Image (tube, coloured by chain):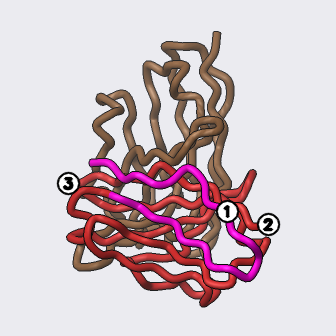
Amino acid sequence: YELTQPTSVSVSPGQTATVTCSGEGLENKYVCWYQQKPGQSPVLVIYEDTRRPSGIPERFSGSNSGNTATLTISGAQTVDEADYYCQAWDSRACVFGTGTKVTVL
Amino acid sequence: QMQLVESGGGLVKPGGSLRLSCAASGLGLSDSHMSWIRQAPGKGLEWLAYISSGSSVIYYADSLKGRFTISRDNGKKSVYLQMNSLRAEDTAVYYCATTTIGALDALYYFDNWGQGALVTVSS
C-alpha cells in the first residue's frame, strides 16, 4: 500500500498551506500526520483524520475524503516550516507517506 | 509524558549485528504498545516493527525479511530491536515510539518519540 504526497509546498506567512496525501481507498482508512523539523524527532499533529493532540495549535486541521487526506495549516507561521508525513495502517502494517517539505516565506 | 531514550547505535560492518535499546523514564512503559521506525539520511520515515504492551502481538514490515526482531522487558522498562545481517541500506536514525491504537483498531499511530539512535553500516 502506498501513500503519495507532493514533494514540496510553499506558502506565505499568514496564508493557508494545504498538504495532500493520496492512496487507493484512503477514505476507508484513518490517517494521521506528523511534523518533523530539521534535526528533530517527528511530532504527531493530527490523528484519526481530524483530531488534534493536546498542545497542537488550532491552525492545524485534517480531513479525509475520496482517495485523499489533507492537512491544512491555516495562517501558517514561520515556525510551521518543516517536513510533514501522513500515515495510515493497512493489513497489520504501518504505511508512511512520501513526505512534504512545507516552506513558509 | 514518558521520555524515551534510544541507545546502542554506532558503526557496524556489513553482515554484522546490533541491538538497539529504548529505555523509558517514569511510569507507563509496561502499559504502552511500542514501535521502531527508522529514517535513512535525507529520506522519509519507514516503520519497522510493533510490539504490544504484553508482547502478545508483534508485527513486522515485510521489507525486513526476518532480519530484525523486536522484544521488550517491562521490568527493565525497555524495548529492543535486534538487527542481524546488516546492510549499507540499513544506515539510518532509528526511533522508538509509543504506539496508540485508535479508531476501533483501524489506526496505529505514534504519539511519543525518542530522540533517535544513529546506525551506520559501512566497511
| Left/right of residue B7 with respect to residue A98 in the rendered view | right
Q: Secondary structure at mark 3?
A: loop
Residue at 50% across, 73% down? A71
Q: Secondary structure at mark 1?
A: strand
Identify the chain of the residue marked 3, using the numbered disc in the image. A
- Inspect the image, locate mark 3, and give the three-letter code of the amino acid beneath it: Ser
Q: Is residue A55 visible?
A: no
Which residue is identified by label 1?
A: A10
Look at the image and give the residue range highlighted in magenta: A1-22
x then y, percent, for residue B45 = 51, 48
**What number is the disc on residue A91?**
3
- Precedes in sequence: disc 1 or disc 2: 1
| Real-space CA distance between mark 1 and mark 2, rounded to the nearest whole angstrom | 7 Å
Which residue is identified by label 2?
A: A105
Residue at 57% across, 81% down? A60
Colour of chain B, in one word, is brown
